Structures are given as C-alpha cells and as structure tokens.
Amino acid sequence: MPVVHEVFAYLRVRDTPAAIEFYCRAFGATERFRLVEPSGRVGHAELQLGPAVLMLSDAFPEFGLNPPAGDADIGASVHLHVDDCDAVTAAAAAAGAQVLMAPADQFYGERSARLRDPFGHTWLIGHSIEQVSPQEMQRRYTALFEA
C-alpha cells in the first residue's frame, strides 16, 4: 500500500490571475509561483494558505480540464479552519464571495459558514467553539433529525 504524504486541493478556474487576487484578499493566501504558457493561460499556480498549499490552473478543455459551470454545486468543497470564522467570512464577502450560509454555531463544536467564490468553488469556513466527542456529536446529529 502506498504512503500518502500530503493532499492538495487543485482548483480549475476561468481566470487564474483573478482567482489568485481573490484568494489573497479573501483568505490571506500568498502566491508561491505560477507557470504561464505563451498564450497567457496559467498551467499551474500555487498559493500558500497557512500550512496548506492550494493549487490552481486555468481551464484546459482540450484535456478535459474544466472549471465549475455557473452556480451549480460541484460536489466538493474546501474547508478552511481559521481563527475567526466571522472575520474571514466578512473578508471573503467583501472580496466578492457569495455567502451561502452565514456564520452560525454548529452541533459539531464549530462556528462555520459556507461561501461560493466568484469562480464557482464552495468554501466552508470554521473555527472551534468547543471540543465534542464523536459520541456526543452523533447524539446531537441524531437529535437534529428527530426534532
């Protein structure tokens, strides 16, 4: 069995330079580098988000690499665990993100929000508000459906 050393989110977007600018303003990312082909398309870019690396590229439909289509959910999201969910959500909204769920305390011990960035990707933003055991989390989760 192979050993996994790291996992990277790799997002395809319609305008990588604009996405880099957005992620820097909204989430405090810093650009590590980008590779640009002669036509101007960004084939690969890396951003530092705290201890994590976010990878981006423009669309390459000739290789089946396409960005999200409009406002449709793509079935995946990126979760940022931050110091202050409310502040990060406000910064992201000011930078152009759509707030899909305002910050609220959740049963699993986190204050969290859900955003869609201008490039069609969904982000979960959260910070811990209490330590909850898996057993207590399950009890609370079950109670949500019994109410």
Image (cartoon, rainbow, N blue to C red):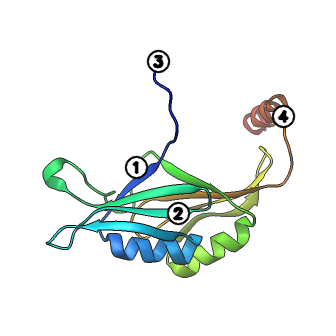
Question: Could you say which disc has been placed on residue 48 in the image?
Answer: 2
| Lower position in the chain sequence, tag 2 or tag 4 | 2
**Residue 35: numbered disc:** none
Element type where label 3 sits in the image: loop
Nearer the N terminus, badge 2 or badge 1?
2
Residue 133 disc label: 4
Q: CA distance from mark 3 to mark 1?
A: 30 Å
Tell me if residue 7 comes above or below residue 89 in the rendering: above
Which quarter of the figure is the C terminus placed in?
A: top right
Q: Earlier in the sequence, mark 1 or mark 4?
A: 1
Closer to the observer: label 3 or label 1? 3
**Tag 1: residue type?**
Ile
Question: Which type of secondary structure does the marked residue at label 4 adopt?
Answer: loop
Residue 62 in the image: above or below residue 145: below
Q: Mark 4 and mark 3 in contact (Cβ < 8 Å)? A: no
Q: Position of residue 111 (x, y in %)?
A: 76, 57
**Chain-order first, disc 3 or disc 1:** 3
Q: Between marks 2 and 4, how big is the CA–CA gap?
A: 31 Å
Residue type pointed to by label 4 = Ser
| Label annotation for residue 1 | 3
Labels 3, 4: front one:
3
Mark 3 surroundings: few (<14), some (14-19) or many (≥20) residues within 10 A: few
Name the residue at 19% across, 67% down.
37
Mark 4 and mark 2 in contact (Cβ < 8 Å)? no
> Based on the displayed image, in which of its 4 quarters is residue 134 positioned?
top right
Distance of label 3 from label 4 (alpha carbons): 30 Å
